[in-house]
Image (cartoon, grey):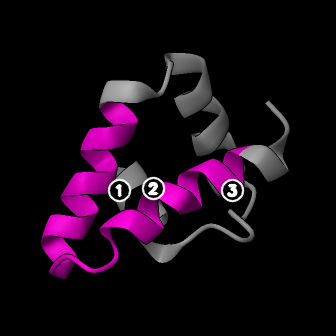
């Protein structure tokens, strides 16, 4: 998947959960990623974060540490 699309998709998830209390939001994003993203998508996300994670919502960055 193209990085721009991956960032957009991940940020949409974070935007949905952003209204929740912080810990619930992080857990919600992490749970969604775990349930609905394929392992290769998660690998790509972790690689992208390792390269700086430009443009990713802070909730995505936190949630990715839990997966």
> Which residue is at a point 60% across and 28% down the rendered structure image?
41
Specify start and end residues of the magenta stretch as a single range. 6-34
Sequence order check, earlier mark of 3 and 1: 3
Sequence order check, earlier mark of 1 and 2: 2
**Gap in angstroms between the C-alphas marked 3 and 1:** 15 Å
Residue at which label 2 appears? 13
Q: Quadrant of residue 49?
A: bottom right
Query: How would you classify the magenta stretch by its main secondary structure?
Result: helix
> Which residue is at a point 75% across and 56% down the rendered structure image?
51
Q: At which x and y percent is residue 5? A: 77, 46
**Gap in angstroms between the C-alphas marked 3 and 2:** 9 Å
Q: Quadrant of residue 27?
A: bottom left
Circle 3 SS class: helix
Residue at which label 3 appears? 8
- Label 3 neighbour load within 10 Å: few <14, some 14-19, many 20+: some
Dot in front, 3 or 1 = 3
As drawn, the label of residue 23 is none
Indicate left or right for 12 with 7 as reference. left
């Amino acid at each position: 998947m193209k990085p721009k699309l991956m960032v957009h998709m991940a940020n949409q998830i974070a935007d949905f959960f952003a209204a929740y209390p912080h810990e619930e939001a992080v857990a919600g994003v992490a749970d969604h990623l775990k349930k609905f993203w394929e392992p290769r998508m998660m690998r790509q996300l972790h690689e992208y974060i390792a390269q700086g994670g430009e443009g990713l919502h802070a909730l995505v960055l936190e949630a990715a540490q839990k997966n």
